[in-house]
Image (spheres, rainbow, N blue to C red):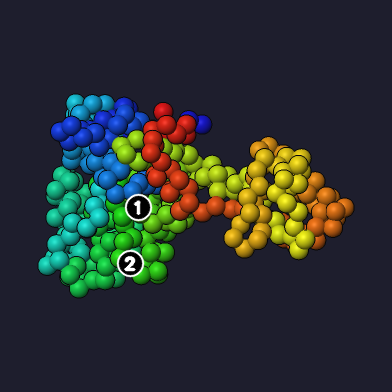
Amino acid sequence: MQKEVLVHVEHLTRYYGQTCAVNDVSFELAKGEVLGFLGPNGAGKSSTMQVITGNLAPSAGSVTISGIDLLDNPKRAKHEIGYLPEQPPVYRELTVDEYLQYCAKLNRIARGHIGKAIDTARERCGLGDVRRRLIGNLSKGYQQRVGIAQAILHTPAVVVLDEPTVGLDPIQIREIRALIRELGEEHGIILSTHILPEVQATCTRVQIINAGQLVFADSIAGLEQRLNTTSLIAGFHAAPDTGTLQQVPGVTQVDTLPDGRMRLNYADTDPSEALIAQAVTNGWRLYELAPERRTLDQIFIELTCSDEPGSNTEAAA
């Protein structure tokens, strides 16, 4: 079954004077997806988010929200977007209900539907017990919930969340992540974050931008495969030299680690069985053999510290 595409970004480019902040970026977001959008400071992530939400005009390219061109019909397109900036746009002197009523009017929700819209948003965000409390007296976690409630109040197709868990304690982070996953079932979510484990815990897809270009775009399943690298870590009590290990069928390169263990890189064929057999035959006294697993942090650094990020073959088309 073909998914409903909610966001279609095509050849998006944004210049600031002579500086190209976003360079020919294209991607899609479908209903039911939570897209993790990553990038180092100055990579073009914020500019891309501002263009998608209609707060910044592109220099070239197009953005379509639920089939509506953002440039041709900005009011209709923006009505399909809910946005939570990094600093929640809440009024501390208002109660939760007062603030949501104000937001309902800003979003031009019909007077007869305001009560139901507020009740639904409040329930989904777990705000029932604090509805009459001043926002300024709430914890940061609850203020984030209020910010998310205003973003989904008008039931938009797309919800854009910018760093929604920054400054929260571990319990609040877990609760907000669970809320985002729940929202992802009925909306399309774009989640901008610097917290890399948050992507693995919350998102269904991930893309990384660097120097204005997408350098990685894949599903979380694809990311997990990338994390499982084609290399083994081996420890020997009587280690052979690296030249001997490179003769093991399948091994393409051998590196000696600082602790004396060996990293064996391979291409297509896992050399584990051949290595074990030769270790027994030659008395290498193998005591450890395990696949090496990289972290998302390592992949992020590899992709964003390249001198030529746009040359990466895995960039989104």
Q: Is residue 264 left or right of residue 58?
A: right
Q: Earlier in the sequence, mark 2 or mark 1?
A: 2
Q: Estimate the spatial distance between the alpha carbons at disc 2 and disc 1, rounded to whole Å.
A: 13 Å
Looking at the rendered structure, the kind of residue marked 2 is Leu
As drawn, the label of residue 193 is: 1
Residue at the limit of the structure toward the left, as seen here: 93
Q: Nearer the viewer, residue 86 or 289?
A: 289
Q: Quadrant of the C terminus?
A: top left
As drawn, the label of residue 177 is: none
Q: Nearer the viewer, residue 220 or 70?
A: 220
Q: Position of residue 236 (x, y in %)?
A: 74, 60
Q: Which residue is mark 2?
A: 168
- Residue drawn where x is 77% and y is 61% of the image: 238
Q: Is residue 257 visible?
A: yes
Mark 2 vs mark 1: give the one in front: 1
Q: Nearer the viewer, residue 282 or 286?
A: 282
Query: Looking at the image, do the residues carrying marks 2 and 1 touch, with CB atoms under 8 Å apart?
Result: no
